[in-house]
Each structure stands twice: as structure tokens, then as C-alpha cells.
Image (spheres, rainbow, N blue to C red):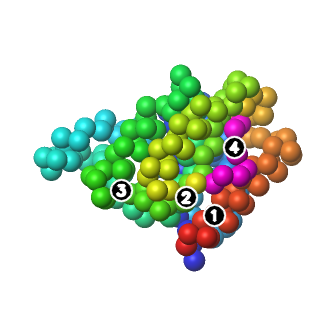
Amino acid sequence: MTKNIGILVGSLRKASYTKKVAEVLANMFPEDYNVSFIEIGDLDLYNQDFDDEGNVPESWKTFRHTMESIDAVLFATPEYNRSVPSVLKNAIDVGSRPYGASVWDTKPAAVVSVSPGAISGFGANHHLRQSLVFLNMPTLQQPEAYIGNVLNLLEEDGSITNQGTLDFFQMIIDSFVELIKKYS
């Protein structure tokens, strides 16, 4: 049975290192997995009044509808100020409401943090995991995916050629697939 995997990237930059890593990871899923990048940069900021008043922006409706068809989520995030970028947090908030209608509930998740620095997005990775616990998303625990010094991994075309890194990435995806199967 085909599984629909949504990838949410917390960086909006055209030349985003995080998106380049996510693209490499996306190509490592089994052939019977449908992998798509979910756009979050055009989401209106979350304001509960819109839900309460029944005046929900179209961007929220589209996002929530799209996420309903997703079976599992790979979150790829840079670290901004030791936390999750606001665009990613906004997507989480939009998808979690209205109360009792979260699009995240029970969907398996994996978190990959990417950084040009040595700390590897540790703060963002763990802040994001706090939200996923509350959202009732079973989240891949091992292997932990902190991708540091990313500039040393990426080729000019955005590919990654280091076999050790590619093997590690495949281990992440294989473990995530096993988690997805447990919750199918």
C-alpha cells in the first residue's frame, strides 16, 4: 500500500541547505512511498480568532486539507536563535487547530536538523520534538539526525557524495519507514 510522506522544510531561502538535505533524503524512500514537499511559506499567521469566527484563511484550508492525506511527516529544520524557525512553528500551529481537529494526531514523524555549525541544530531539533509529543506524533528516536557542518557535505549542485553520510541518511529513512509501518 502506497504511503504519502509530507516533507516540511523550515527554511524558505532559495538556496536553503536544509532543503537540499531534505531533497537527498526524499530520494531515499522506497519506490512505493509517495514523497512530496508541503509548502508552508505562504501560510497566514495563526490567530485563533479566525477559527473561532469561522473566517479561516484559504491558505489554512489548503494546508489542512493537504495534510489530511499525508500518512507521515519528515520535518527538516535549520536552527534560528536556538529554536525552530517561525514559519515551521506557524505550520504546526495552523495544523493543530481547531482544537480536536489536529491534522498531526498519530502521524509518524522524523526530525532532521541541519546547520552549517558544529552544534547541528540541536536546539531546534529538541524544541520541535517537544511540540510533536504534545501533538501525539510518534517520533523517530534513533538514529538521531543532527546534520552539522553541512557546507562540508554539499556539492555545488546540492548533491551529497560522501558515502558515509549517504549511508547514515539511508539508515534514517529505513528507520523512519519501519516506524511508519508500526503505525499503519
Q: Amino acid at mark 2?
A: Pro
Task: Using residue 142 as the reference point, say whether residue 88 is left or right of it.
Answer: left
For residue 131, say whether it is visible.
yes
Name the residue that disc number 3 marks.
Answer: 102
Q: CA distance from mark 4 to mark 3?
A: 26 Å
Q: Amino acid at mark 4?
A: Ala
Q: CA distance from mark 4 to mark 2?
A: 16 Å
Q: Secondary structure at mark 4?
A: strand
Q: Position of residue 162 (x, y in %)?
A: 85, 41
Q: Position of residue 55 (x, y in %)?
A: 16, 46
Q: Position of residue 152 (x, y in %)?
A: 79, 29
Q: Magenta segment, principal secondary structure?
A: loop
Mark earlier in primary sequence (1, 2): 2
Q: Are marks 1 and 2 in contact (CB under 8 Å)?
A: yes
Say which mark, if any, is on residue 179.
1
Q: Where, quadrant-wise, is the C terminus in this rendering?
A: bottom right
Q: Which residues are magenta?
A: 140-147
Name the residue that disc number 4 marks.
Answer: 145
Mark earlier in primary sequence (1, 4): 4
Q: CA distance from mark 2 to mark 3?
A: 14 Å
